[in-house]
Amino acid sequence: MFENLSDKIASAFKQIKGEGRITDLNIANTVKDIRKALLDADVNFKIAKEFTDRVKDKALGQKVLTAVSPGQLMIKIVQDELTELMGGAASAFDISGTPAIIMIAGLQGSGKTTFSGKLANYLKTQKGKSPLLVAADVYRPAAVEQLKVLGVQIGVDVYAEPDNKDPRSIAENALKHAKANNKNIIIIDTAGRLAIDEEMMKEAAGLKAALNPQEILFVVDSMTGQDAVNTAKAFNERLDFTGVVLTKLDGDTRGGAALSIKYTVQKPIKFVSSGEKMETLDVFHPDRMAQRILGMGDITSLVEKAQAQFDEEQTRKIERKIRKNQFDFQDFQDQLQQIKKMGNLKDLMGMIPGMGKAVKDIDISDDAFKGVESIISSMTPFERSNPDSIDANRKKRISKGCGRNMEEINQFFKQFDQMKQMMKNMNNMPAMPKFGRR
């Protein structure tokens, strides 16, 4: 995420490392390089200039505290300004209606329908709500079917009227259906176009007037950079939406949309999304995003993702088994499944401070666990629960079952034993961190 921008800003900070004081001389090249990094990330020139001017004004003349280098002070100034540029703090999301009405808008191809499914899943699993998805895109042939597939996948009802070509009528009927079936949130997936046109704007404005939604979320493809910002501005002038959603952050994202959109339309980014998995949706925190752009990681979000996926009682059960040295292959497989639900592995590793640069050139596939899972799946239930029962003959059978050679099988067993010992040692420490506790 924003790897090029992060690298270029990190390179800019090298200009002032080792100096005892920030001066006109050693700040000039740093600010120049930061501005160039922002422009390369497709940030509007005016925004980039104002941003770096503020950084320069704050940095000049500031004395470095004891044991704090100019580089560290400069990073803190840039971090604060990036946070402010992107909104300052996470924005509230209004789901107070009975039912709450959330309208999803944006251009075709921006990821509206997928986001609608992710949002429904988030509200169901994280907020304990009973959402209803509404298929109000009557133009794109696959839109209704796609929403239905997503609804089945996450266990959320979808309201659709395939023969009705009036989005307003569909939405109004969906509202009645929601009230009759105790749905406390409805999410309306509206139609998009390949480009902004008057018909789409009138339709969206009509839906807003008829439903008076608590939230109107404008979905933009973050890979389109400044074009996304311009589109958001045009939509906001007609629709006055309440917030922005940035999708496809796992793609070749330069960062221009995330850095520019709040400044341009004066509406907060409320959610960010990456990939196709329904769990890959995050509330947008400007301070955390600023940390990630500056290579500081984002441990807070990583812990929150873990807490969302790891059941507290299950975690305690695993901890007890580890303390008794009874952690087995079934436990290991269960933990792998939970980790996979947290999102893209490379993105997760990038949240660990210092790891972003280390993994940026490494291809970490979401299938990275496939080999391990195939070995465990080739075991019998008894073998998974009793690792010590697996002798040479059982290993040979497992090897044939998963298509892995004996060297790979033995290596996996060796690594599993090492992991068990490490976990046991950690649990014997006086102040063991309670991973997964809320």
Image (spheres, grey):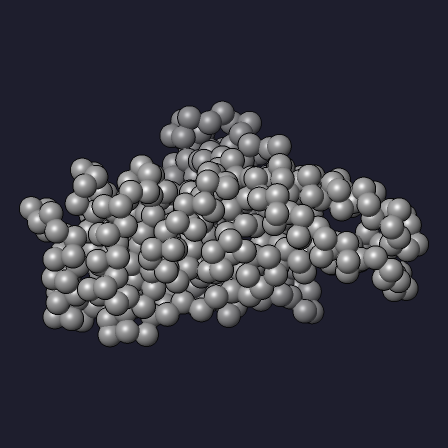
Residue displayed at 57% across by 39% down: 42
Q: Quadrant of the N terminus?
A: top right
Indicate the position of residue 204 as horizontal and vertical percent values. Answer: 26, 54
Total numbered labels: 0
> With 14 as the anchor, is 211 left or right in this view?
left
* Identity of the residue furthest to the left in this view: 163
Q: Is residue 194 above or below residue 178?
A: above
* Identity of the residue furthest to the right in this view: 20
Residue 346 in sight in this render: no
Residue displayed at 49% across by 60% down: 266
Q: Is residue 82 above or below residue 185?
A: above
> With 178 as the anchor, is 76 left or right in this view?
right
Indicate the position of residue 188 as horizontal and vertical percent values. Answer: 25, 56
Q: Is residue 432 above or below residue 253?
A: below
Indicate the position of residue 44 as horizontal and vertical percent values. Answer: 57, 44
Residue displayed at 13% across by 56% down: 170
**Nearest the camera: 404 or 270?**
270
> With 163 as the anchor, is 196 left or right in this view?
right
Residue displayed at 49% across by 25% down: 405
**Nearest the camera: 239 or 186?**
239
Indicate the position of residue 401 as horizontal and vertical percent values. Answer: 38, 30
Residue 238 in sight in this render: yes
